[in-house]
Each structure stands twice: as structure tokens, then as C-alpha cells.
Image (tube, rainbow, N blue to C red):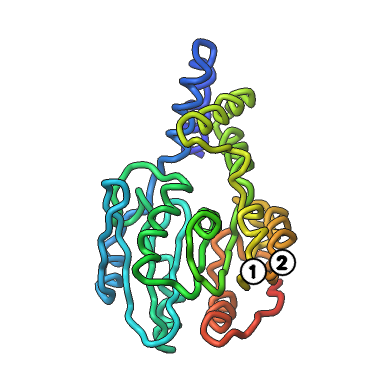
């Protein structure tokens, strides 16, 4: 409740500012959109991460962290979502370590042990690329924003990844922005200014950021898991991805929420990653 009231208060300030300068207000709104509020490691998290070899790399002058659990099997890269960190994959990692897979998890920019105060999809994808050039992942698994970043990486960088798992992944970015605008109660006409900001600052089109579009020409195999009652990313977005990504299997769930933290999901995905066993629909 307090967080909602704070968001609405910020929205009022931005809407008032837009009367005087829509471009500047759009820039401030985008800066806020790219600034996570949490995702740092707790002491308990740190204990788990001590079991891995920590690798610090540089992306555009900023450090980002990754964690390596060495194994002789295929290399799996875990890519977390918004306001999270590598520890969200603990149950998956514990499972796959028993099968001697080579496991790496990345902390996104502005999350976990990584530097920066902001994150964008291109920034996340660039960090993934730097890491991928070292580890050469056979399999990638991304949750939420991490899934979108994986698709952007695969569409813009050279990588021979064989399988991809998407959990609660949004598509397109534009819809994420609209949901953010709704939370703050922002004027919808600011979206035009935001699109112009993308054109000017990133030399790209906001409307082209889409998981479905990113994967439309890819032949890698994979699965898409999404809850029908997801309160963060609408279930319909997973259907768009499945329709566009021809070599994917769509796995619906019901009642597991956006996080999909459920033992059946974890076991099914780990079986797919390690033994290529396709999961069936998991609906409560």
C-alpha cells in the first residue's frame, strides 16, 4: 500500500513536470524505470554463493559478477529477472550440480554484487555476451526480464546456444513500459517522447524490443513456462512468444504466480536441461 502511494506521488510530480517539458519528464521516467529498488545479497545468500567461484568482469567500465559451479557436463547459464539476483536459482543449481553440469549464474547490472545503479535490456545483453564469450553456454534459462535479455542477446550477438528456457518472460518491452506508466499514473502521451528518447540515445526503436520478435528467426529448441494467473507479466505474452518461436514448447501453469518457485517446475526444468526430457503441462 505504501509503495503504491509513493508510486502515485511520483506520478503526480512527473505529470506536473510534463506540463513544462515532456522530453525531460520522459527521460526522468525512463531513468526511474531502469532503477531497481532491491536485489542485493543477504548474508544467507552470500553463504550459498561461497560454494561457487566468483568471476568479476567489466562491461563499459562497470563491473558485474557471475558465479561458477564447475562440472563436466553441458554449460548452463542462469539469467535472473528484475530486482533479483543469482541466488533465486539455488534450487535449480543444487539439483543440476548432482548431475555434474557446468553451471554459471550472472548478477545483472545494478543487482546482486554487480555495479551500476541502472539496468537496460541492451546493457544486460551486453554483459551476457561478455560472459558468454568465456563460458560458451549450451543452455540458457531466463526469468522475467532475464528472459527478455536472453532473447535480445541471442538476436544481437553470435552464440551457439542449443537450448533456451523462458520463465514468466515479457514481450514486448513496450507493454512493460505501459504497465509501469499505469502504476505511476503517468500521462500516456509521454510514451511518444520516450520512443524519441530511444531513437536519440540508443539509436534504436522502442517498438522493436520484443522477445517474440527476437526469437522469430531462431532454430534453437526450448520451452516457455508461464502461469495463467501471472500478476506481473500477462499470460498472453507467453502465447505471442510461443507463436513466433517455432521450435518452442509452451508449458502453462496455474496458481504458481510470476516467480514459478515450485518443486514440480524446478524438477521438470532440470530434467529438460540435463536429460532432454520434455515436461508436460503443469496446471494446478
Q: How many marks?
A: 2
Mark earlier in primary sequence (1, 2):
1
The x, y position of residue 27, in whole percent, is 46, 27
Label 1, residues with CA under 10 Å away: few <14, some 14-19, many ≥20: few
Q: Residue furthest top?
A: 20
Residue drawn at (36%, 52%), measured in percent from left and top? 111
Q: State whether residue 7 appears in this view.
A: yes
Say if residue 13 shows up in the picture: no
The residue depicted at 48 percent of the width and 62 percent of the height is 158
Secondary element at tag 1: loop
- Check the picture and name the quadrant holding the C terminus: bottom right
The residue at the point 50 percent across, 33 percent down is 7
* Circle 2 residues within 10 Å: few <14, some 14–19, many ≥20: some
**Quick check: 233 left or right of 131?**
right
Q: Is residue 91 above or below residue 124?
A: below
Residue 113: image x %, image y %?
A: 28, 56
Q: Is residue 195 above or below residue 213?
A: above
Q: Badge 2 is on which residue?
A: 246
Q: CA distance from mark 1 to mark 2?
A: 7 Å
| Rendered location of residue 210, percent (x, y) | 62, 49
In the shown orientation, is residue 73 left or right of residue 15? left
Q: Are marks 1 and 2 in contact (CB under 8 Å)?
A: yes
Q: 244 or 66, which is in the foreground?
A: 244
Q: Which residue is mark 1?
A: 219
Q: Residue at x 71, y 72 (%)?
A: 283
Seen in the image, is 234 located left or right of residue 101?
right
Badge nearest the viewer, 1 or 2: 1
Q: Secondary structure at mark 2?
A: loop
What is the residue that sits farthest to the front in this orientation?
Answer: 158
Amino acid at each position: 500500500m505504501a509503495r503504491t502511494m509513493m508510486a502515485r506521488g511520483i506520478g503526480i510530480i512527473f505529470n506536473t513536470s510534463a506540463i513544462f517539458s515532456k522530453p525531460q519528464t520522459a527521460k526522468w521516467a525512463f531513468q526511474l524505470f531502469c532503477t531497481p529498488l532491491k536485489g542485493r545479497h543477504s548474508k544467507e545468500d552470500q553463504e550459498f554463493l561461497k560454494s561457487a567461484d566468483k568471476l568479476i568482469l567489466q562491461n563499459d567500465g562497470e563491473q558485474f559478477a557471475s558465479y561458477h559451479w564447475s562440472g563436466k557436463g553441458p554449460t548452463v547459464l542462469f539469467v535472473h529477472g528484475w530486482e533479483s539476483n543469482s541466488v533465486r536459482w539455488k534450487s535449480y543449481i543444487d539439483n543440476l550440480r548432482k548431475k555434474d553440469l557446468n553451471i554459471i549464474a550472472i548478477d545483472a547490472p545494478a543487482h546482486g554484487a554487480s555495479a551500476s545503479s541502472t539496468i537496460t535490456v541492451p546493457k544486460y545483453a551486453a554483459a551476457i555476451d561478455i560472459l558468454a564469450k568465456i563460458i560458451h553456454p549450451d543452455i540458457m534459462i531466463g526469468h522475467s526480464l532475464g528472459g527478455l535479455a536472453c532473447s535480445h542477446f541471442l538476436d544481437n550477438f553470435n552464440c551457439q546456444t542449443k537450448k533456451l528456457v523462458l520463465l514468466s518472460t515479457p514481450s514486448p518491452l513496450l507493454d512493460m513500459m505501459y504497465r509501469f506508466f499505469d502504476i505511476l499514473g503517468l500521462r500516456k502521451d509521454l510514451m511518444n517522447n520516450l520512443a524519441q528518447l530511444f531513437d536519440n540515445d540508443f539509436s534504436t526503436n522502442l517498438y522493436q524490443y520484443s522477445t517474440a520478435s527476437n526469437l522469430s528467426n531462431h532454430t534453437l529448441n526450448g520451452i516457455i513456462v508461464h502461469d495463467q494467473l501471472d500478476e506481473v507479466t500477462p499470460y498472453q505474452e507467453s502465447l505471442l512468444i510461443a507463436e513466433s518461436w517455432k521450435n518452442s514448447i509452451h508449458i502453462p501453469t496455474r496458481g504458481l504466480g510470476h516467480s514459478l518457485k515450485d518443486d514440480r517446475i524446478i524438477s521438470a526444468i532440470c530434467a529438460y536441461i540435463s536429460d532432454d526430457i520434455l515436461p508436460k503441462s503443469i496446471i494446478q
